[in-house]
Image (cartoon, helix red, strand yellow):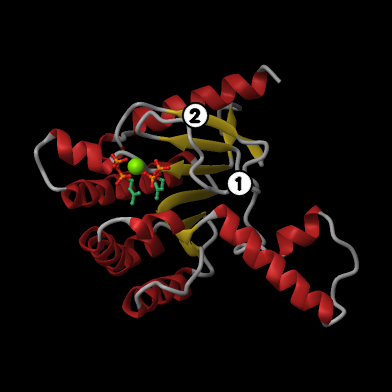
Amino acid sequence: MNCRNSSGNAMPGHIAIIMDGNGRWAQARGLPRTAGHQAGAKAVRRIVEDCVKIGVSALTLYTFSTENWARPLVEVEFIMRLLEDYARQELSELHQEGIRLRLLGRRDGLPASLLRAMDETIAQTRNNTRMTLYLALNYGGRTELIDATRAIIAANERGEIESLDKATINRYLYAPDMPAVDLVIRTGGEYRLSNFLIWQSVNAVLCSLPVLWPDFTSDDLNEGIELYRGQITSQ
Ligand code: IPE
Ligand code: IPE
Ligand code: MG
């Protein structure tokens, strides 16, 4: 969904970010990993604001992967609480900014109180149209394809599947109306996709930046967008 901003420059309509490096950020300061996640949540606030301002229409943040359950229980519980706080504290801000919140991932396994807080924010923001913020939470690209396949088999048994093509798969993903990803930014300097949006990112531009997620600023976002422009215009 490549589009143009008011100055006529190419803009990624959908940016997806692998927010990596919280643990390393904390370690470098002699702090527990949880402090890195706390600092990471602040970076989320900044970047959501930036994306709205520059006119991105969809932003997906990789918040917790299906693989992240393997981390120590205290870390997992801390992240879940942080997310619940985020949903409660950011509600009015998101709504004021015209942002629609959606979740992307398996609900099973997530704490009930977290889901309640998220669902409330999702319901209140559902008619907002300025930008959609997708939180990939208990998300895995392979799990998403398994869940889609299961749903397609069930629909087929009800006689609802006429043909199997890209559009059919799209219809059974967690967010069928989500636009294709234009730009994937990974912070923390690694070049892995780590099971993120494997179906939706087939034509995306990939940008790996060395900055650790809690230090991510508007300048880093602009660097990603510039890289995207370079790739698009050289196609
Ligand atoms: C990303 O930062 C946040 C989550 C996966 C929840 P990490 O916690 O993976 O940070 P590093 O990679 O260990 O530095
Ligand atoms: C990817 O980061 C997942 C999130 C940012 C939520 P990880 O740190 O979990 O990924 P790996 O372990 O480097 O693949
Ligand atoms: Mg990591």
Q: Which residue is mark 1?
A: 198
In the image, what residue occupies the spot 23% across and 58% down?
Answer: 75
Give the image quadrant in which the ligand numbered 2 is located.
top left
Residue 190 in the image: state x and y as whole percent: 41, 30
Residue at 11 percent of width and 36 percent of height? 29
Look at the image and tell me whether residue 136 can be seen: no
The residue that label 2 is drawn on is 207
Q: Amino acid at mark 1?
A: Ile
Q: Amino acid at mark 2?
A: Cys
Across and down, in percent, residue 94 comes to 38, 60
Residue occupying the far left of the picture: 30
Q: Earlier in the sequence, mark 2 or mark 1?
A: 1
Q: Which secondary structure lies at badge 1? A: loop
- Furthest toward the bottom, the residue is 158
Residue 166, placed above or below residue 161: above
Snapshot quadrant of residue 98: bottom left
Q: Is mark 1 within 8 Å of ligand 2?
A: no
Q: Quadrant of the N terminus?
A: top right
Q: Secondary structure at mark 2?
A: strand
Q: CA distance from mark 2 to mark 1?
A: 15 Å
In depth, the one of 234 and 165 nearer the eye is: 165
Left or right: 170 as drawn, with respect to 165: left
